[in-house]
Image (cartoon, grey):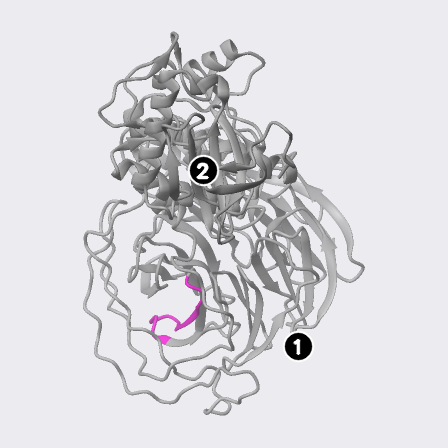
Amino acid sequence: MESLGPEDPEKVGPYRVRSRLGAGGMGQVYLAETPAGRRLAVKVIRAEHAADPRFRARFAREVEAARKVNDFYTASVVDADPEAASPWMATAYVPGPSLQALVAGQGALPPDRVRELGAGLAEGLAAIHACGLVHRDLKPGNIIVAEDGPRIIDFGIARALDASAMTATGAVIGTLAYMSPEQIEADEVGPPSDVFSLGGVLAFACTGRGPFDASSPGAIVHRVVSRDPDLDGVDPFLAGVITRCLTKNPAGRPTPAQLLAELRIVQSPVPPPPLAPPVVQRATPVHPPAAPPPQPGIQGPQPAMPPAAPVPAQGVMDARPGVAPTVPGAPVAPVTVPPLARSGAGQQQVRRRAVLAAVAGTLVAGGVGVLGWKELGGGGSAANAFKKATGLGEGDPTGGTWKLLEGVDVYELRSTKFSPDGKYMAVAGWSSGTGSQCAGIYDGTSGARLARLDGGKDGANEIAFSPHNRVVALACTDGKVRLYSVPDGRAVATLTGPAKRAMGVAWSTRDRIAAAGQDGGFLWDSSGRLVTRLARKDKYPGELYSTAFAPDGRMVATCGADQFVRLYDGVTGARIADLGTPSATSVAFSPDGRTLAVGEYGGTDGNMVRLWNVQTRTELAQLPGHKSVTAVAFSGDGRRLASGGDDGGSNYQGTIRVWDVASKTQLKLLTTPHHCMSVALNADGTKMLSSGAAKPVLWTGL
């Protein structure tokens, strides 16, 4: 806010002016008060424009347009006088800076905030378009970042959907750097034009610059109309979203509703309740549906199967801190698990062009899902497409052989694991909606699917085997950690505690379960009793992405968006030490417990795998090559380390590196269709389970 000057009015209409809020293209904006003291934002047309009938008409349209849109997405119009000597409009005052001012003052926003911003703006644009309007001037300066979501303001050039293009003295009206090609060329402008502008706004939020910035207006026009956007440094998932928004052809852009669905996939659908001690409801566990045989092809959900009859409950578990289980000595007591819902036969697979891994602010990953296999292969089977993408077979006969595993309903695979004894494999990923079976247990030799598991709404982020191979823990996006028996997939228990999504989960040899989530870390004992919250050194924006136990169970590590890998006592949860590193997405202990591998994501000049000496807290080595690292895993004998992620580029091809731990040298470089989100090695490092789009990939002969 700025103090008033001698040229500023003391009152506008019946409202007393208190200070300046800023200036727009048509006028000055003031903070004013009603006679009762309520605050308003009052926009007054500049004197040089007030006498121009065109500007008066434009201002009258702005008032009319702003009144049409629900005030949840805009600043609601309280009063206006377009006929006054100096036309004015008073709206509700929305506390918060403009996006332009916010980024100028604080720098680019972390990806999780950009996703939240994008979801709010997409919802706002949907409301604007539903009123028959096109905003036509969406830009960082016209977005107020309020605590409860963004507001779109300044409808100065908003037009009805059936209106013709509006020009003034031969120039298109709007803010050049965020205008669509059709708007610059004065073609028909509809809702897709606002989507193009939204893409530019999100790019600005990610980087602090526009995607078509240049030194002159002519150069900006050339870039908008003819060049690809500059998205260097943008989180991969958001880069994919923004790229589709900035498609030159309006027909190729997503709708606001599609963007909203995509951006909200990895977020809580409603604000989470305050964190409370975990509570496990008492009810009867159920058997999961019998696993149908794998279906041919790679797209579409598996046929739903009716659930089997429930079996009698054998006990309950009280998950309140300090309360002992009611079944002493039981490794996990049966408790309430919501019935496994059937996956709808018509469930849509989300189609996305980019993948997002754990971002500096929040780990989320997008992905192309089932899209892309035929495209990558130029036609033909999924196997041929994958072969072409990997460069294996004739191109690299030493790379190993692979096969795709079928039978889970996900559009992006997030986690792959071998059981400690190698008898089983498990995978988990994101689904689109409630009731889909987003995780699976497989035979470790044949690759046959043995069971499918329910991860709740929107699926799961990670899966982990218990040390005794009899149970898997599933970290779900709804904040729950669900436990299922191996190999039949029977629901065993549900651990609650995280108020927001659970990102990572690990199980120790001392029967502790740790989860990393959007609201921190949690440590339970085998009965489901919450032992403690994993204390953080400072509060920070973002979340924890991954957690891992040392082989002896005496230490647990977490990583996340606060640029620290944190070490805790694996039994009590007391914090031991912090290791400084850029934002990291994955941690793994070597089998001897001496080394911790950290996969980085948040570095600005490329990321790497760092190896740390756990006892001395010193860095042992840096393994470069990836642009972003989303997964690290040691082989059971400790001789090999696999890292997954991507090496940059516009095709979002994933890369996997296999390293010799002793020499710190790269043994193999493998590629996958789309960003690789997970890797797992077996005991001797000759088998690997990885993710590539929506399917698990089992590699052999490495």
Q: Is residue 47 above or below residue 425?
A: above
Q: Which mark is residue 222?
A: none
Residue found 35% across the figure and 33% down from its top: 63
Q: Looking at the picture, tell me which residue is in the foreground, 313 or 435.
A: 435
Q: Looking at the picture, tell me which residue is in the foreground, 87 or 612.
A: 87
Would residue 503 be seen by someone viewing this image from the given angle? yes
Query: Of the residues shown, which amino acid type is indicated by label 2?
Result: Gly
Residue 298: x percent and y percent?
A: 28, 45
Residue 68: x percent and y percent?
A: 29, 39
Residue found 58% across the figure and 30% down from its top: 8
Query: Of the residues shown, which amino acid type is indicated by label 1?
Result: Thr
Q: Looking at the picture, tell me which residue is in the foreground, 669 or 446.
A: 669
| Position of residue 530 in the picture relative to residue 139 (left or right) | right
Which residues are drawn in magenta? 478-491
Q: Which mark is residue 572?
A: 1
Discs 1/2, front: 2
Tag 2 or tag 1, which sits nearer the N-term? 2
In reply to whether residue 40 is colored magenta, the answer given is no
Badge 2 density bin: few <14, some 14–19, many ≥20, Cα 10 Å? some
Q: CA distance from mark 1 to mark 2?
A: 65 Å
Would residue 234 be seen by someone viewing this image from the given angle? no
